[in-house]
Image (cartoon, rainbow, N blue to C red):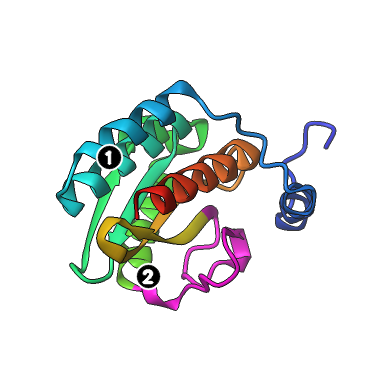
Amino acid sequence: SSGRIPTDKGYRFFVDRILEEKSLGFEREKRIEEIGRELQKLRDILIISRQITKTLSSLSADLALTYLFREDISWKEGWEGVVQEPEFQDIDYWKEFVEMTSDFEENIGDFDYSGGIKVYIGKESPLKSKDFSIIVAETSFPKKDKGIIALLGPKRMDFEKNMGLVSEIVELLKKLS
């Protein structure tokens, strides 16, 4: 990009190539394997959801969110990591991100969850704010509870790593269901 900020279409081209190759670029870390062993011992779906959220946020440096449909509850983790990104030094950008996060939670049912991991980049988002990226997937939590896992961050988030993380967590949850 010769130092320029890529457009939404540029990011989309990159993400589509990752999806075509089915190479999500995230090698299973010991941490995810450890979390899997820990989660197998847990029975409370709320504790499992919260632990998944903490894991996603710590490994991604973006804001992680899990949502459980039956309980109508969500967890958010990772505020301290996402605000370290340079874009968040602008207070207006920070405020818009907080508003977008609330908007996402309020409209979580408006997203398309069919076909695996979905990536919304900038203007592709069904939300009012168009300056961010969202990676989201529907999954089954233990006891067949349907839910959502998502990563929210700046448009230039590490798509390859984050898509791989979400994919790994979805696979982990399938094994626990």
Compared with 24, 177 (above or below) is below
Q: Which residue of the protein is positioned furthest toward the bottom in this rendering?
A: 110
- State whether residue 71 appears in this view: yes
Magenta span covers which residues? Answer: 107-134
- Work out whether residue 78 or residue 43 is closer to the camera in this orientation and state it: 43
Drawn side of residue 81 relative to residue 129, left or right: left
Residue at (14% x, 50% y) in the render: 44
- Using the rendered view, name the quadrant where residue 27 is placed: top right
Give the residue at mark 1. 40
In primary-sequence order, the first of circles 2 and 1 is: 1
Q: What is the crowding at mark 1: few (fewer than 14 residues within 10 Å), some, or many (at least 20)?
A: some
Q: Quadrant of the C terminus?
A: bottom left
Compared with 34, 131 (above or below) is below
- Using the rendered view, name the quadrant where residue 62 is placed: top left
Q: Quadrant of the N terminus?
A: top right
Q: Which residue of the protein is positioned furthest toward the top in this rendering?
A: 30
Amino acid on which disc 2 is placed = Ile
Is 116 covered by the magenta stretch?
yes
Q: Which mark is residue 108?
A: 2
Residue at (51% x, 55% y) in the render: 134
In the rendering, at what x and y percent does residue 145 appear?
28, 65
Amino acid on which disc 1 is placed = Gln
In the rendering, at what x and y percent does residue 141 appear?
32, 57
Q: What is the crowding at mark 2: few (fewer than 14 residues within 10 Å), some, or many (at least 20)?
A: some
Drawn side of residue 165 relative to residue 89, left or right: right
Secondary structure of the residue carrying numbered label 1: helix
In the rendering, at what x and y percent does residue 73 appear?
20, 62
| Mark-to-mark CA distance, 2 and 1 | 27 Å
Secondary structure of the residue carrying numbered label 2: helix
